[in-house]
Image (tube, helix red, strand yellow):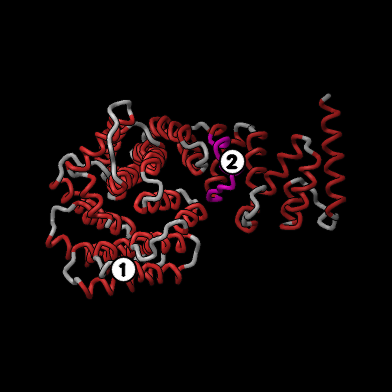
Amino acid sequence: MKEDQASYFESNDFLELLTCYENMVGGGASHYFDGIDISNIAEFYSSMDDDDKAMDAIQFGLSLHPEDTDILITKGQVLLRQGKSEESRAVADSIDDNDNRELLFLRGSIELFDGNTVLADKYFHLSVEADDHDPGLYADIIAIFTDYAQYDFAQTWLDEALALEPESKDFIEQQADLYFATQDYDKATQTYNLLIDDYPYDIYYWEQLVCIAYRQEKWSQVLDCFGYIEAIDPLYDSMNLIKAECLMETEAYTEAESVLHRTISEKGESGEALFLLGNTLSLQERHEEAITYITKAIGLNPDDKVMNVHLAGELYECGRYSEAAANLTTAFEAGIITAADTIRALIIPLLKEDNTRVIYEMLKALMDVSDIDDNEYGIFLPALTMCCWQMGYTDDFRKYFSKAYDRDSDGILKLFGVTDTNISKDEAVSLLMRVYDNDNKNVE
């Protein structure tokens, strides 16, 4: 059904029909359209993700043919695509044509959307029986079960379809796609290669092999597939970001950089492309340039705090330690953490610069992450405690000193120069606060 429909949408007959309808809607001469014409026009708009135009066509069609089954079924399908299952069900219930295969398919789709998978399967069987086992209908049923991740049902229908037409390209392709969806990559690869034997110029199969090899981190295989794709279509650029990433993984940095510059030039700036370009430049030790592109990427993707961690690394490499800490603070506040060694490496130059406040803000944000692993990141409690003490943040000092004391009492006491290891936690806090107050009075 879907492939036949897609082919029809490309036909001259349909294009003339659509032009006639759009001219009329635009103020041209009125024209008569039967129910199936309007249904096809609405389905076309829906396939283009323009549900507003689809519903306008449906309303126009129903004004001409108030109870037309084809138009009503299309209305139900559009409503279901919009997630309005109750409204779609109401439309289906209003149709008095219970043996109609399209209506039965719609009812099955509604039940599947609502989670009633077994009932959906029953409606799909009734739909197939009503149309003498049409292959296109089988393909639609397999596709919708796959889309809803009901892979066992999809496989059952595929087995039946392949028993009827074992040489069908469409069903073999759906089998390959189902293997892909269930991550059975060996069988998927084998099946796509069988299809390529007969249809070597079908780029879709090569693209699927790219995706499989990419997920398996077989970078050279990915690039080999791109070689075949570009031999078929020298202007192909649909998966340039994957190609660039694989080139980076194989240390072909300058080629990756070229691909990314071309992609940005032709398709405009995107966060992903800019971020990859920044990383490519970083791998070439061109850190200042990397900062420019990663900063732009963050501007386009402000919610992606992982990028802040990468930007912090570039800023660190350029000796911009306070800025690096600020980016890590932003990431920590969003719950994104990085390796303890990275944080430690940054604290050392910040201490040399006497950037107590910057260290405090970064480590406090780190400690406030709800699921932080205290065993790994607890090593920073003493540094944070010292920052709180030096800045006179009494409440934070008490809070973090207590945690540091519970973790390693001897270590935190030694850090503050307290030699009495038998001193209690509260006594130590009181002592250190008196020392702080005295030191600040002397300064005044």
Name the residue located 32 percent from the left edge and 65 percent from the top edge.
Answer: 178
Amino acid carrying mark 2 in the image:
Ile
Between 141 and 226, the residue placed more toward the observer is 141
Q: Which residue is mark 2?
A: 347
* Residue depicted at x 13% and y 47%: 232
Q: Earlier in the sequence, mark 2 or mark 1?
A: 1
At a point 37% along the width and 67% down the height, the residue shown is 124
Separation (CA) of disc 2 from disc 1? 73 Å
Residue 410, can we see it?
yes
Res. 444 image quadrant: top right
Q: Residues within 10 Å of mark 2 (few under 14, many from 20)?
A: many
The residue that appears at 63% across and 32% down in the rendered structure is 355
* Residue 379 percent coordinates (x, y): 64, 52
- In the image: residue 6, left or right of residue 443: left
Query: The residue under label 1 is which amino acid type?
Result: Ala
Q: Report if the CB atoms under discs 2 and 1 are less than 8 Å apart.
A: no
Q: Is residue 245 visible?
A: no
User: What range is drawn magenta here?
Assistant: 324-340
Residue 130, labelled with which disc? 1
Taking depth in this image into account, of 6 and 378 the one nearest to the observer is 6
Q: Quadrant of the N terminus?
A: bottom left
Q: Give SS at disc 2.
A: helix
Chief secondary structure of the magenta portion: helix
Mark 1 secondary-structure assignment: helix
The x and y percentages for residue 97 are 38, 61
